[in-house]
Amino acid sequence: MVISNFARSNFVDSTFTDQSSVVKFIESNWGLNPMGNGVADTGAGSIDGMFNFAAPANHPLPLNPATGEPGFGR
């Protein structure tokens, strides 16, 4: 599950991902060189498809100020 103002609404991505996919996303998004020897994130699936950065973020994400958990408008 991806919780972000830029997450695609009503979208299911069937791309195989794991923890190294997050590292790969960070490297790709900010133009960084692969960390270490790049073995783990070289074969990682991309999470880019889960986001829509072209559209403005128009989905507010209310968080519970005490816990930081998403409030989802409650």
Image: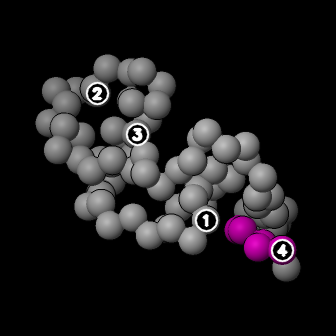
Q: Pointers 2 and 3 in contact (CB under 8 A)?
A: no
Question: Disc 4 marks which residue?
Answer: 73
Q: Which of marks 2 and 4 is nearer the N terminus?
A: 2
Which residue is identified by label 2?
A: 35
| Any part of residue 4 in sight | yes
Report whether 61 appears left or right of 35.
right
Q: How many labels does the image show?
A: 4
Examine the rendered structure and indicate whether residue 36 appears above or below residue 57.
above
Q: Where is residue 20 in the image (x, y as percent from the top left)?
A: 30, 47
Q: Quadrant of residue 69?
A: bottom right
Residue 28 on image: x %, y %: 39, 30
Q: Is residue 16 found inside the magenta-colored segment of the image?
A: no
Q: Which mark is residue 25?
A: 3
Residues 61 and 15: in front is: 15
Task: Determine contact: label 3, label 1, CB under 8 Å.
Answer: no
| Mark with earlier residue (2, 3) | 3
Dot 3 or dot 4: first in sequence order is 3
**Whole-percent x and y of residue 56?**
73, 43
| Labels 1 & 4 near each other (Cβ < 8 A) | no
Identity, as a three-letter code, of the amino acid under mark 1: Ser
**Inter-mark Cα distance, 2 to 1:** 31 Å
Q: Is residue 70 one of those drawn in magenta? A: yes
Q: Distance between the residues labelled 2 and 4?
A: 38 Å
Residue corresponding to mark 1: 9
Q: Give the range drawn in magenta.
A: 69-73
